[in-house]
Amino acid sequence: MAPMTRTPSLAARDAGRPPKALLISGIAAPLLYGVADLAAGVSWDAYSFRDQTISELGAKGAPSRLLFAVLLVGVYSLIVAFGIGIRRAAGPNRRLRIVGTLLVALGVMALTVGQLASMELRGVEQGLSGALHLAEGAAAMVVIFTAMGIAATAFGVRFRWYTIATVMLTLAFGAWSAMDTARVGQGLPTPWVGVKERIFWYSYQSWFAVLALTVLKAAPVSGPPRHDEARRRSAAGS
């Protein structure tokens, strides 16, 4: 009788495949960030989404500070999970593994330094807190743009051009909104800075979701066993 050929186990076939939940975290993170922005802004009666920055929601002494900080812990925990998922999906693709590592670093930095480097309220002398806030923000953007640049070379032309357009849009609106930094510290009016900054923030936040969808489409991912797989496993073991 011919020797029985065993079907590889599900565990063996799923080895190295990233669970979908890790990659979907890249979609959930920007969605939760939007919820944090909206919920914290609504909780502060005097807050203006049009004329105030997002960072003011987490400023020391702001009524929205605790709620915003708690929700951001969730956001950046999802970013860490997403980075791990990217690394596991990368396989032999070294560039994609680097992107995953950078996203993990971004999440860890935001969960540690970012939680401590909060700005002071508008019109209050920023001092060391304000300087740390700006430095942490600048470091985070370096990490993000580096990840975007490397990821742009890891996929097709459409993703590359989308990434280039996102970087240009983010840089343009980031620089534009940064022009009001001194006025925020001085407590002066900053009309439309909230709109400009949100275009800046949500441009690259949306990129996380697009990257997640791109990796999900390109990489096999593990999930609950399908009925036909379960039947084959049962037959192979009989």
Image (cartoon, rainbow, N blue to C red):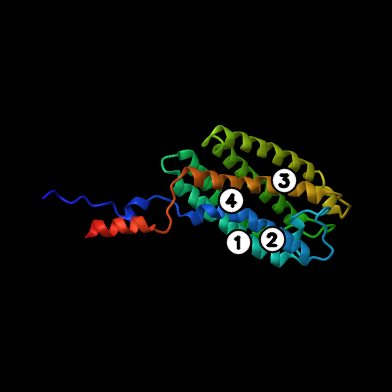
Q: Which residue is mark 2?
A: 36
Q: Residue at x 42, y 43 (%)?
A: 91
Question: Distance of mark 1 from mark 2, alpha carbons?
Answer: 10 Å
Q: Is residue 218 above or below residue 53?
A: above
Sequence order check: which comes first, mark 3 or mark 4? Answer: 4
Judging by the rendered image, the residue that carries numbered circle 4 is 106
What amino acid is found at the position of numbered circle 1 in the picture? Gly
Q: Are marks 3 and 1 in contact (CB under 8 Å)?
A: no
| Circle 1 residues within 10 Å: few <14, some 14–19, many ≥20 | some
Determine which of the numbered discs, if any, sits on residue 74 in the image.
1
Label 1, secondary structure: give it.
helix
The Cα–Cα distance between marks 2 and 3, rounded to whole angstroms, is 16 Å
Looking at the image, tell me whether mark 1 or mark 2 is earlier in sequence order. 2
Dot 2: element: helix
Labels 2 & 3 near each other (Cβ < 8 A): no
Q: Nearer the viewer, residue 141 or 220?
A: 220
Q: What residue sits 67% from the left and 36% below the top?
A: 165
Q: What residue sits right under mark 3 in the picture?
A: 200
Question: Which quarter of the picture shows residue 207?
Answer: top right
